[in-house]
Image (cartoon, rainbow, N blue to C red):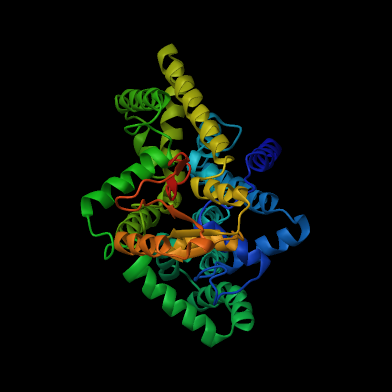
Amino acid sequence: MFPLIFFSLISRIYFGISYVEDIDSLRFALSLIKFDVINLQPHFPVYPIFTWAAIILHSVSNSYLLTFSLIGAFSTIIIVICVVKIIGSKLTMPLGFFVALITFFNPLLWIMGVRYMPDLMGVAFVLLIILIFSNVKKVKCFGFIFCGLLFGVRLSYAPFIFPLLLSNYFSSDNKLRDVVLFFLGIAIWLIPLLLLTGFEDLFSAATRQTMGHFNEFGGTLSTEPDIFERGLATLRSIWADGMGLYWPGRHWLTILSSFFLLTLFILWKKDNSNTSNQNRKINPSVIIGLVFYLVWIFLFQNVVHKSRHVLPILPFVCMGIGIVIAQQWGTGRFLNRFLVCGFLFCYSAITLHIVNQHKTPTAISQVKDYLLSIHRHDLQVVTTPLIKFYLKTHEIKANLIIAGNQNELDSLYCHYQERDQTNIKSFISINNHVSGAVPKLKKTFFHNPYVNRLWPKLSVYEY
């Protein structure tokens, strides 16, 4: 246990980040300065348990890196312990060791463990709930409290635990007690939230953000209706982003990792003697919850542009891979053990490379640093609403203007050209160039999309 705690803390702090990498992270970072639900600091559903834990840690450490890395480290510890116990093993046993290793080095779990967001804490709560409900009957009542608490950490993970929650409620000998405990879990965070925000303001923020999520900016089926694209993006999020395996355009090491893993599965399929035993370890309600959650994110989450929505699925993928690897290692055959070692080496190397790249600022952060480095106050910067919000909160000294489309950008540039020449400003456009105009300077900033899928490439055009 101590090595897990030690390596989780050291690794997550060492690979922590000291910059704001995207808009969602920005809102959580701002909430540590001023908790303001109406101004989306953070945005609804507020994630109060995560946010308040971060505020307390930040008040002590005065460091974003330490605050979010510590939350991520302890969430990782809980996740690893839970996946090992869910499959009925121990860290000191080969099965438990391999499952723990695969989970610990999972690239997306690691990245989300240092990002300024509540997702990994939400996964830790989901697995803790599954473990409690799978345990002896006398402690199952605590699962209802944690279900209520989960809604205050990551509300969108609720579909995952609903089947498990309902099955335990209907099989309970004391349904009234369990209902009370569930609502107690909700009351722990909801009552303070209402006192801090007020019912009307909270209801207004909830209505506005809920409508926006499902109908405007949430990336749901209504705004991103291409079924094939959504399906492919979901597969990519699990296979490539989530497990670090090969996808067109990726490094050759991901090909090798995929080859080792697929070969191990082929060899494993030849021996089905232990398959049924392993399948019985997973509660059927968990499988149903997994399917519900997949349908939920496919229809109602931004799976096209944000791979983090598959996060609760990944521990179960890690369990499956760990079971196969442990069985193949247990055969004692040289080929099987060579494939296991080969996969583990490639898998961990890919993860370490990704999390090391994560320490380098994302493209939007690089754009911000570039604009700050210009040291001029006569800049006219034209961009999108979200990028404007990001730059404004980082105190970019420029006239920030929104252009909703190409025509608006071209019109703003024409107006700029017609200005009084005694008051000339540099006209800068981010990510779109003016039609028919040749920029005097173009700079392009990149980050690895497997680190963060939001704006992996941004160009700055100066006229």
Residue at screen point 55% across, 64% down: 153
Left or right relative to 331: residue 73: right
Q: Pick out the residue farthest to the top.
A: 334
The answer to whether residue 45 shows anywhere in this view is yes
Left or right relative to 67: residue 458: left
Residue 401 in the image: x percent, y percent? 46, 65
Q: Pick out the residue farthest to the bottom.
A: 200
Residue at screen point 78% across, 59% down: 60
| Along the viewing direction, whichever of 189 and 93 lies nearer the viewer | 189
| Along the viewing direction, whichever of 144 and 88 lies nearer the viewer | 144
Q: Pick out the residue farthest to the right.
A: 60
Quadrant showing the N terminus: top right
User: Residue 93 is drawn in which quadrant?
Assistant: top right
Q: Eyeballing the image, is 442 above or below 391? A: above
Residue 457 in the image: x percent, y percent? 42, 44
Residue 38 in the image: x percent, y percent? 54, 77
Residue at screen point 76% across, 55% down: 61
| Along the viewing direction, whichever of 44 and 406 lies nearer the viewer | 406
The answer to whether residue 218 shows anywhere in this view is no
Looking at the rendered structure, the number of numbered marks drawn on it comes to: 0
Residue 274 in the image: x percent, y percent? 38, 32
Q: Eyeballing the image, is 326 above or below 319? A: above
| Along the viewing direction, whichever of 362 and 404 lies nearer the viewer | 404
Residue at screen point 26% across, 66% down: 222
Left or right relative to 26: residue 420: left
